[in-house]
Amino acid sequence: MVATAASRRWVSVEAQPEDRTGWLPALSGRGGRISRVKAVDANLLEFLKKGTQFVVPIYQRVYSWEPSECERLWDDILHAGTRDNVGAHFTGSIVYVEKEHGTRTSAEPDLIIDGQQRVTTVTLLLAALAARLEKLPDNEQEPVEGFAPRKIRGLYLTNPLEDGERFFKLILSQGDKDALKSVIRQAPTPTDATSRVFTNYELFVSKLAHPAVDLVAVCLGLKKLIVVDVKLTRGADHPQLVFEAMNSTGKKLSQADLIRNFVLMDLSPQDQTRLHEDFWYPMEREFTGVHADRFDEFVRHFLTLKTGSTPRFGDIYDSFKAHAFALEGVGAHRESIVIDLAQHAQWFVSMALGKEPDAQLAKAFAEIEQLRATVVYPFLLRLYADYAAHTLSQSDFVQILRDTISYLFRRVICRIPTNSLNKTFSGLAGSIYPAKYVESVGARFLTLGSYKRFPTDSEFDDALRVEDLYHSQRAPYFFRTMENHGRKEEVSTAEYSIEHIMPQNENLRPEWKSDLGAEWEAVHSRLQHTLGNLTLTGYNPELSDRPFASKRDMPGGFKDSPLRLNKGLGQLQVWNEAAIDKRAAELAAQAISIWQRPHLSEDILAGYRSEFAESTGFDWSLTHDILDAIPAGRWTGYHSLAEAVGTAAQAIANHISKCSTCTHPYRVLTWDGRIAELFAWSDPKDRRDPAELLESEGVRFISGVADPEQKLATEDLLALVEDEV
């Protein structure tokens, strides 16, 4: 079997391998072109022997092979070493940038840009093999010619006549560097070792120590390892393009890996080290452990702020490259791009990862995290930049955050679809008037219409009273905020659970049926999960389904509760529909005062409406996204589409009849499923019958009316583009 040069699998080659000496295809892209890159077959041990030193650049990811991958390599080497008909074992490619001027006498090392994982693993196996052979009697220490401990170390692991770092054949990056040095020197493994270098070295040590292992087979298998040797010329070839091509298959690099390689790879080793140590590594270090997945999220927010467009998660790297190339096209340097990214990362870490030193800002940022409203971060990055530049005061920043939290939470309670919030917040920064910061942001919130709207007090009040709050994912946040608002010493509500005062159990006790009255079933069904019937308690199992009087008077019951949410419950004689509605009204009024709407006069708003209309115009991008996403066999109405994108049905009809960008306009019908009388294609030459098109796609028509079961409502349309926001 033969693998391609980009393969990352260990593949056996029966008998002698075919000659793969040749040229990689031409690669091109912004920033460089490689017309031909020489790629030749090479024996891996000969490759290591001829090279003075190979260095994994500082920007490359750490050594990450799992034990299972080492096991597979071990099995493949034994397979090749025990079979005469296996002449070679292809292990993939090694791509490296050669020394300056291509000389082997230069002090500059060869830089490995792809293949470092397999080279490191083979190096660990060779080190373990040398250590194992040293324990054998002198006459058994060279089971195969060339595989004595001294020869293994002197030919493949070290440069015996050198000292310092030049003593080692392979230098790894970051935390693995000292680990590999320790293994080669045969130093004891540190007790606090975390590098996978130690783990995999010990794995090979244990395998080689097994009495049944055939050391001759191991040596013969190692001799058969073949790689594709891809040598790039420093200053002539463009290593980033080759790196992307070689990594198009196999173990996928993260977007962070690709971006790091992109910004540092083309720089001199000295500049790489300086930018990595001064900017990149301090930034990357913040996104470790539980925050490891948030770097890609941050870059996505950064790009949304900088470009006004939100990339898909899989396109973050390509979008970042396009952003960098655009800046370089107007004279920016790679260093300034890295510094800008690192600065914004510091602000993101303060907001999203709990590192903000200001207590009031930290509290607001924590609430945004609790709401899981990550869509706001492009907007907040702009705010933080102005805050850091002293354009935005701390108090104004806090006020805008409070308005933003209110906007988000009111929409959750009012069950307004959140699918389009990315587009809302990606454009919000354009509405900022620095001289009137708080007012202009508040005005933009209040002038958003339809599905983007800021719910009014009345709408918020109605939803709070009647909606199922118990099953809301934001219920813990809501009750925690309600209980602690205005407190200097906050109560840790994590120790409490949400309690139904009137039990949610359908099999109510007679006392409950009596209190609720003749319509007890309807009252129970309507109010059991609503705000008026919910509270916090630390005695949920004890309260259980007891009658109200028992819940009130028992030890730890409502009379004894120190919580503000339970204030007044201890004085009630009965818990019925009227009591639930009264408490719901009181708590809703309190919630309205906590999650406030900005207060601006109609005169002020009228002025902003005019300015916003002149500066922006209507954004039809969501309309285009939805039309493109409507699947064959489904249809929607003009009114449903208009409601989804925040405009009028007539405006939708006018737009799609003239817009060549709108796909599938024929899938938009009247409210009752008919082809609109004035339907027209944007191309006057298009003579297709929309009804025939729909029927060919599976839409059923009866007497000229499309099947209502195949209609997509407003919420269905927004769900279609959920992955884009």
Image (cartoon, helix red, strand yellow):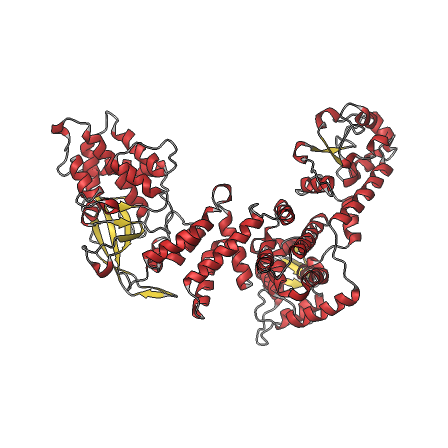
Return the residue found at the far left: 139
Q: Give 47 or 270, whichever is nearer the viewer.
A: 270
Q: Give 596 or 689, whichever is nearer the viewer.
A: 596
Return the residue found at the far bottom: 684
Q: How many marks?
A: 0
Q: Give 137 or 451, whichever is nearer the viewer.
A: 137
Q: Give the vertical position of 462 relative to 575 (above or below).
A: below
Q: Is residue 318 visible?
A: no
Name which quarter of the figure residue 652 lies in. bottom right
Residue 216 locus on image (x, y percent): 18, 33
Q: Quadrant of the C terminus?
A: bottom right
Left or right of 543, for residue 148: left
Residue 350 locus on image (x, y percent): 56, 49
Q: Give the vertical position of 515 relative to 24 (above or below).
A: above
Residue 396 locus on image (x, y percent): 67, 57
Question: Which residue is found at the position 47% from the left and 60% from the top?
Answer: 319
Left or right of 605, for residue 30: left
Q: Is residue 337 visible?
A: yes
Q: Give 478 or 39, whichever is nearer the viewer.
A: 478
Question: Which residue is found at the position 57% from the left and 59% from the top?
Answer: 385
Residue 6 locus on image (x, y percent): 32, 52
Q: Give the vertical position of 481 relative to 651 (above or below).
A: above
Name which quarter of the figure residue 582 lies in. top right
